Each structure stands twice: as C-alpha cells, then as structure tokens.
Image (cartoon, rainbow, N blue to C red):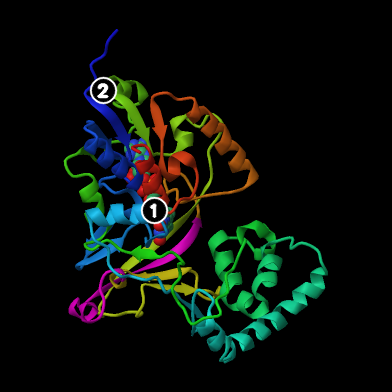
Amino acid sequence: MYMQHTYDYLIVGSGLFGATFAYKAKQAGKKCLVIDKRPHLGGNVYCENIEGINVHKYGAHIFHTANKKVWDFVNSLVPFNRYTNCPVANYKGKLYNLPFNMNTFHQLWGVLTPEEAQDKIAQEQSKIREQLSGKEPQNLEEQALMLVGEDIYNKLIKDYTEKQWGRPCNCLPAFIIKRLPLRFVFDNNYFNDPYQGIPIGGYNALINKLLEGVETRTDCDFFSSDWGLKKALSIAKKIVYTGPIDQFYDYRFGHLDWRTVSFKTRIEQTPNYQGNAVVNYTSHDVPYTRVIEHKHFEMFGQAVYDCPKTVVSEEYSTEYKEGMEPFYPINDERNNTMAEQYRALAMQEKDVIFGGRLAQYRYFDMAPVIEMALQYFE
Ligand SMILES: Cc1cc2nc3c(=O)[nH]c(=O)nc-3n(C[C@H](O)[C@H](O)[C@H](O)COP(=O)(O)OP(=O)(O)OC[C@H]3O[C@@H](n4cnc5c(N)ncnc54)[C@H](O)[C@@H]3O)c2cc1C
C-alpha cells in the first residue's frame, strides 16, 4: 500500500548530529521534524543564560578541529571567537600550567631550558624503568610513571585520574593513558588543532542557525506512549536516531554503562573569580575535579569586568545511575561486546540512521560529530 509521509526525516535528538543533519536535509529540499525529550534544543552543547553569561549546562565545551571543511562550515553559520584553552592545575594551593610544557617544568623544578627539563624527566623516569626492568606497564600508574616520571605523576595525574574514574590508578588499565605529551616549549595551548574557539553568541546561536526553518518539538520523548518506531515510520520516510542505542532495542542485550559528571553551579559576586575558564584540582584534598568559570569562554579583557558577576561550576565525576546524563562510554570488555551486538542490529536497519555519540556508544568531540552528519550529504 502506498503511504503518504508528512516528513522525509524524523530526527530524534537536537544535538549537533541531529541539528547538522536537519540543516543539510533542509538545504537538499527535504522536510524534517526534529524532536527532543529535553525542554530545550541543542543537546549537550546547550547553554543557559545566567547573569548575562552563557553557562555550559552539560559541561564545558571547547570547539577544536584540524578539519578545515568543518571549521568553514560552522563559521559560515556563526563566526567563532579566539578562545584558546589553557587550563591551569591547582595542586595543594600551587598553580601549574597545562598541558605539560616548559612553563609547568619551570614551576615544578625551576628549570630554565628544554635540556634541563629533559634531563630532569629522564632522572624521574629512571626509578620505574629499573622496577619494570623491560616489562610492559601493567596498570595506569606504571604507564604514567613511565611516560612522565614521579613528580608530574604524583602532583598532576594520580589523584585527578582517581577522582575521574573513582578507582586507584594501580587498578586502572594502562591503555586509558596511551600518551602524555610533554612539550619542551613555552606553550599553554591545550589543543594541537589549528582551529579552535567558541561560537560568538554561544552554542545556542549555532544550534539556532542549524535549525532555522526546521520544525522542532521539545519535551517530546521518542519512547513515550504516543511515539515509537511504528508511529515515526508512519509519518516519516526515515528516522535519524541520536538517542542511546541500548534503549532503541529495549535493552535486549542489557544496559550499557556510562560515566557521568555532576555539576554544582553558583553565582559569585565578583567579576573575575579564578582568572581562567578551566582550573583542574589535582589532589584528593578537593572533592571536585575542575572548576569552570563560564564567562572566560566568551568575554575577554575589559568585557570580563563590564559584567559584574560570574558563574562557576564545580565538576564531580560520578558513576552513572538511571536518570542521570549518560556522558562517557565505558571501554571495558563487557560494554564493548554489548555495544558491538547493538551496532550489528543497527547495521541491518533500512529506515533508521544511527548517529552521534549515544547511538554509537562512542565518545566523539563536536567536530567529528558534525563531520559524520555532513557525510550523509556528500
Ligand atoms: C562533559 C562533556 C564535555 C565535552 N566537552 C567537549 C569539548 O570541550 N569539545 C568537544 O569537541 N566535544 C566535547 N564533548 C563532546 C560533545 O558533547 C559531543 O560531541 C556532542 O554533544 C555530540 O552531539 P550528539 O548530537 O551526538 O549528542 P547530544 O548532544 O547528546 O544530543 C543527543 C540528543 O538526543 C536527545 N534524545 C536522547 N534520547 C531521546 C529520546 N528518546 N527522545 C527524544 N530525544 C532524545 C537528547 O535529549 C539530546 O538532546 C563533551 C562531552 C561531554 C559529555
């Protein structure tokens, strides 16, 4: 029987994957409906305006990429500012620049030249080399010690990583830390990518541009009783699904695990609380992992002081429970195997495209997610 569809695509989820897909589909003359179960559009890049500051509600998001095509695409919608991520670490009241570079080495040991720093690190690594005497590192602790030596590990890696994962470093697998780049130049730019910044006007401006002229509905859960696959396929030719893959298949192989972060956000009555967007707390003395001061993503120079208050968020790394936000997939054997089973089912779907981080059960930065959505229209 010939069925008259209202839409070409029903897009479940208005994050960067769904919104980019909708934008390109609209350009190609297709009719889309985007639904999201949250009360707002934008997925995890959504920002809430508090005291005139764009607050990254689902965690700090810094756009960075080496892909010129993606960079040109996002900038064609909204120009990006010159924000450069230069996080600072606070270890027991002392500050160190990140990523590990000549500034950090000077702060740790007073060394002045790259040669002095290299000598010092070699000295620091020698103890673990002797202990392992040629054996492969068996856990994250041994791996990190091999890569950077004792001092950096103890002050800037150990407690921070334990807070992130909720387990001692010597019980975590070595593969979590494959590389720990050491830079023998005075360069605090966290990313190596040539393009980096925040959309001027915030991420909502980008999402609004992507979804301009597209029909959208918020507070609309695909799995609520009045939706579901059957109804969706009665109104749309194809479904673009960006929700959790295990939920799509009603958890038939089990629930996939996630790691998440909870946020304590507050307003401070000062224009400049910590002088930087990102400060990592790298000792167990402090229970949170980072403090984000949101205004520094978008306000520079005098603008920081023209806005009299500031908003900061403490980040607590937390085990995921039902009802929390699923943030980071867990790369252990149980979850990898289960995710493969779900992905195999997804591959067989003719009318459903599975896109983005939840539907693939893989961590992706923003730029690769946009790139993947763009690829459907090349
Ligand atoms: C804490 C954190 C920090 C990050 N920081 C960075 C960073 O600094 N730089 C960077 O490049 N990347 C960062 N990322 C990655 C970035 O968030 C993702 O790449 C991006 O959000 C992925 O977009 P998406 O569309 O796949 O998913 P999402 O943004 O999660 O969108 C999925 C949407 O689907 C909706 N949905 C789910 N189920 C249903 C349903 N049943 N019915 C209707 N709607 C549904 C959700 O409500 C959500 O809005 C970070 C991620 C996290 C978790």
Report the magenta residues as a range.
297-318
- Residue, disc 2: 235
Q: Is residue 365 left or right of residue 218?
A: right
Residue depicted at x 58% and y 74%: 182
Residue depicted at x 57% and y 36%: 340
- Does mark 1 have its CB less than 8 Å from ligand 1? yes
Above or below, comparing residue 31 to residue 193 in the picture = above
- Residue, disc 1: 367
Residue depicted at x 38% and y 39%: 242
Q: Which mark is residue 63?
A: none
Give the x, y percent position of residue 166.
Answer: 58, 60
Give the x, y percent position of residue 342.
Answer: 53, 32
Is residue 253 at least partly visible in the picture?
yes
Give the x, y percent position of residue 84.
Answer: 37, 71
Is residue 14 at least partly visible in the picture?
no
Residue depicted at x 45% and y 77%: 188
**Which mark is in front, 2 or 1?**
1
Above or below, comparing residue 284 to residue 13 in the picture = below
Q: Is residue 167 magenta?
A: no
Element type at mark 2: helix
> Observer-nearest residue: 183 or 228?
183
